[in-house]
Amino acid sequence: MNKYPPLVFIFLAICFFSCKSYGPVTAFQNNSPETIDFGNLAHWAAHPDKRDNADLIPGSDAKPAPNLAADVFFIHPTIYNGKGKNLRWNPSISDSILNKRVDNSTIKFQASAFNAAGRVFAPRYRQAHLVSYSTDDKDSAKKAFALAYSDVKNAFEHYLKYYNNGRPIIIASHSQGTAHGGPLIKEFFDGTPLQQQLVAAYLIGLPVPKNYFERLWPCEDPEGLNCTISWRTFKRGHVPDDRPLGDSILVTNPLSWKIDTTYVSKTKNKGSVFRNFDKVQPRRVDAQIHNGILWASKPRFPWSFLFRRKNYHIADINFYYMDIRLNAKQRVEKWLEARN
């Protein structure tokens, strides 16, 4: 038996957006029991064999370099948050409206941050509805997350069989994606031969215990390999009272790539990407680890005075976009150098 349960079960009671008044109202039913065919490119939000928003580079018409030596398997966050009657706990894999929302949000603004490091693979999956984090129907929520994970696992197995060919891998995820990314790494990498192919895991947006994995340790510097990275961003000075906190939680400073509490000024930030994807804005956001979370001072950007949230979860990647981009590339280069 695994010593630590899947991340989603640890944090099932957490609702990032304080919402529990909408979503599925009946018990979980798997209306789509079929196994998704990931040989169909339509079931990938990003894939090297198709043009997609993960290929975009902020402020540039350029495309990712060809013949990249590494791969990135990106698991996107919850985008399924609709209202209405008779909602499923998990959407159809062919929901064209939802798929377009995924492509124009997380794939464009998050997955693309990794396209300098490797070919980006991002599966579509039957994600659990956002209300699954806060519902009183915990049994249905667990089943919804389990169905979502089965799709992610199926996609990863397809990737390994047909595309990997011994290439180095980055696992990258955000929010619900991290709820699936943690168990995926536990199952396929942690203490297995595949662990040596893992460049690093960027498990962002959920609290990940430092000892969640048996043989994978936190990255402690910008060039660490076969290790894990994580953070959750909140406004400087704010300590949430409804989130796991403390030194047992892995927090990486995305400006220094260390896990100490040293403050790093926004002058070190290589570039954030806000609502205007075409404009990289350097030196806008600082970073400091505090009590199991990442503190960031409120950045200034057009209409930022309307941005009053203290939970910066939605911007975990956007705030540090260029730093992530450069660091992922740096780690791949270090992996290749170590094996040559």
Image (tube, rainbow, N blue to C red):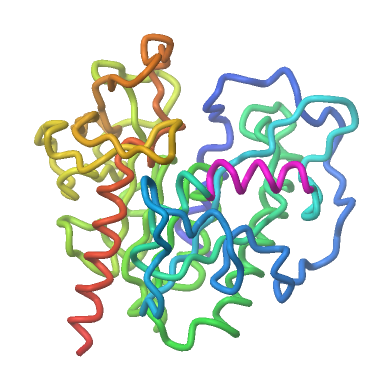
Side of 9 where 220 appears, left or right: left
Q: Is residue 214 above or below residue 142?
A: below
Residue occupying image coordinates x 68% and y 47%: 127
The quadrant of the rendering that contains the C terminus is: bottom left
Which residue is the extreme one toward the front? 61
Q: Is residue 276 above or below residue 121?
A: above
In this figure, what is the number of numbered marks? 0
Taking the magenta stretch, the answer to whether it contains residue 97 is yes
Residue 288 falls in image quadrant: top left
Residue 267 falls in image quadrant: top left
Q: Is residue 83 above or below residue 303?
A: below
Residue sitting nearer the eye, 38 or 261: 38
Side of 11 where 265 appears, left or right: left
Residue 3: x and y, percent?
45, 58
Residue occupying image coordinates x 31% and y 58%: 228
Q: Which residues are magenta?
A: 96-107
Residue 24 falls in image quadrant: top right
Taking the magenta stretch, the answer to whether it contains residue 153 is no
Residue 294: x and y, percent?
27, 33
Side of 107 where 231 appears, left or right: left
Residue occupying image coordinates x 32% and y 64%: 200
Magenta span dominant secondary structure: helix
Residue occupying image coordinates x 36% and y 72%: 198
Residue 154: x and y, percent?
66, 69
